[in-house]
Image: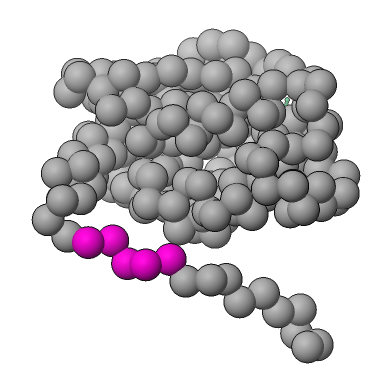
């Protein structure tokens, strides 16, 4: 099994990285392959609402001059996905949001490509804005019919300078417990797949509240 983690920080080994790494260490201990992709230091523009992905249904975003399409395939190949972001102005960091909007729009209009994969958010913050950012990351996971492991608190780790997060003992524990629960859930899903039939996907009802 494989887990791919996306780090929305512009800092390579900042606090988001450490939060992600603590969770991934638990997965690696159990023989799960892991990869961290750094999103936050790339140039990724936001969704231009061209709806070409809806029309083409080729698992691709029409903006083809950046790594988003490669990352969509990385998510498709993975059994588990971690979405990590630092808090910027009480929200997901801008580059990460640009990636997530485009990637999850593509995956949802292509037969819910990420359906029943295991997914979890990880947030790093100095002081305030951890929960709104956690909730925003959860929106992508929930929308995609993914399955989410939890921890013993919300998945937020605190720090300002790179590495500070390692001194947040409670945050470190939250990420460790998240990693352990993620391994367990992934094993349950893998081992249970032959025993318990997954529900048939329903065609999405799409209303705009007018018609
Ligand atoms: C543009 C910007 C906006 C930020 N906004 C907030 C904020 O709203 N609340 C907060 O507590 N920290 C804020 N921070 C601090 C970061 O969340 C904090 O340093 C975090 O550990 C960064 O994670 P990283 O090392 O993975 O980049 C901000 C940092 C930057 C660069």
Quadrant where the N terminus sits is: top left
Q: Is residue 7 visible?
A: yes
Work out which quarter of the rendered image holds the C terminus and state it. Answer: bottom right
Question: How far across and how far down the image is residue 202, in percent?
Answer: 47, 71
The front one of 21 and 143 is: 143
Does residue 107 lie above or below 208 as drawn? above
Residue at x-position 60% and y-position 18%: 38
Q: Residue at x 81, y 47 (%)?
A: 52
| Magenta residue check for 58 | no
Q: Position of residue 190 (x, y in %)?
A: 21, 42
Q: Is residue 143 left or right of residue 42?
A: left
Image point 59% across, 33% down: which residue? 72
Is residue 201 shown above or below 142? below
Nearer the observer, 88 or 94: 94
Colouring used for the render: one colour
Q: Which residues are magenta?
A: 197-201
From the viewer's perspective, is 119 left or right of 197?
A: right
* Rendered position, 7 above or below 102: above
Pick the residue in front: 96 or 209: 209
Q: Nearer the viewer, residue 20 or 160?
A: 20
Q: Position of residue 19 (x, y in %)?
A: 43, 26
Residue drawn at the location 74% of the way across and 47% of the way down: 56
Picture coordinates of residue 64, whole percent (x, y): 79, 26
> What type of secondary structure mainly makes up the magenta span?
loop
**Quarter of the rendered structure image containing ligand 1:** top right
Outermost residue toward the bottom in this view = 211
In-image side of 137 versus 99 (left or right): left
Q: How many marks?
A: 0
The reply to whether residue 172 is in sight is: no
């Amino acid at each position: 099994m494989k887990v791919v983690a996306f780090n929305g920080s512009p800092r390579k080994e900042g606090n988001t990285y450490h939060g992600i790494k603590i969770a991934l260490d638990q997965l690696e201990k159990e023989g799960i392959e892991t990869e961290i992709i750094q999103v936050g230091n790339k140039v990724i523009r936001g969704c231009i609402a061209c709806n070409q992905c809806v029309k083409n249904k080729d698992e691709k975003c029409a903006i083809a001059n950046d790594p988003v399409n490669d990352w969509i395939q990385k998510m498709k190949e993975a059994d588990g996905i971690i979405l990590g972001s630092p808090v910027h102005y009480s929200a997901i960091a801008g580059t990460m949001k640009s990636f997530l909007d485009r990637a999850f729009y593509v995956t949802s209009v292509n037969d819910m490509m990420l359906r029943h994969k295991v997914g979890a958010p990880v947030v790093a913050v100095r002081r305030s804005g951890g929960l709104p950012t956690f909730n925003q990351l959860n929106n992508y996971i929930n929308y995609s019919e993914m399955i989410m492991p939890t921890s013993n608190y919300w998945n937020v780790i605190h720090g300002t300078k790179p590495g500070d997060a390692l001194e947040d003992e409670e945050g470190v524990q939250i990420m460790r417990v998240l990693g352990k629960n993620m391994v367990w859930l992934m094993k349950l899903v893998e081992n249970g797949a032959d025993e318990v039939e997954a529900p048939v996907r329903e065609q999405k009802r799409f209303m705009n509240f007018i018609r």
